[in-house]
Image (spheres, rainbow, N blue to C red):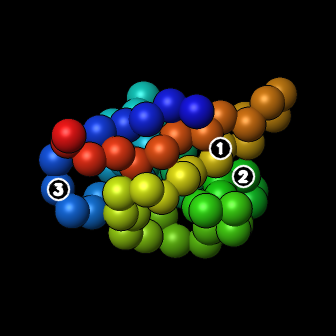
Amino acid sequence: MTEVIIRTADIQLDQFLKLAGAVATGGEVKHLIEEGRLRVNDRVETARRRKLRIGDRVTLDDGAEGKVYQVAGKG
């Protein structure tokens, strides 16, 4: 699991994945959602602008092995 620190109370899913380095563009997030390859807190996600909060977990199924990112706050 990779922790990704945000400096605000929440962040949009697409922005979070770009910050984490998991995708380069919001279009990539759209395709991942359409293919059912993104989960937030173990639920398949359907909205790329979903608000994430500290403690949320995002799982990206990249075909080989899932990558897990956790939203972390500046501590």
Q: Residue at x 61, y 71 (%)?
A: 46
Q: What amino acid is found at the position of numbered circle 3 in the picture?
A: Thr
Residue indicated by mark 3: 8
Question: Where, quadrant-wise, is the C terminus in this rendering?
Answer: top left
Q: Residue 27: x, y in percent?
A: 48, 49
Q: Residue at x 69, y 62 (%)?
A: 42
Q: Work out whether 26 lies above or below 75.
A: below
Which of marks 3 and 2 precedes in the sequence? 3
Q: Work out whether 66 lies above or below 59.
A: above
- The answer to which image quadrant residue 38 occupies is bottom right
Residue indicated by mark 2: 37
* Foreground of the two, 63 or 39: 39
Q: CA distance from mark 2 to mark 1?
A: 6 Å
Q: Residue at x 37, y 37 (%)?
A: 4
Circle 1 crowding by C-alpha within 10 Å: few under 14, some 14–19, many from 20: many
Q: Is any part of residue 54 visible from this angle?
A: yes
Q: What amino acid is found at the position of numbered circle 2 in the picture?
A: Arg
Q: What amino acid is found at the position of numbered circle 1 in the picture?
A: Leu
Any mark on residue 60, and which? Answer: 1
Q: CA distance from mark 3 to mark 1?
A: 22 Å
Q: Residue 70: x, y in percent?
A: 48, 45
Residue sitting at the far left:
7
Any mark on residue 69, and which? Answer: none
Circle 3 crowding by C-alpha within 10 Å: few under 14, some 14–19, many from 20: few
Q: CA distance from mark 2 to mark 3?
A: 26 Å
Which of marks 1 and 2 precedes in the sequence? 2
Q: Secondary structure at mark 1?
A: strand
Q: Is any part of residue 18 visible from this angle?
A: no
Q: Secondary structure at mark 3?
A: loop
| 27 left or right, relative to 32 | left
Q: Residue 11: x, y in percent?
A: 29, 59
| Contact, mark 2 vs mark 1 (Cβ under 8 Å) | yes
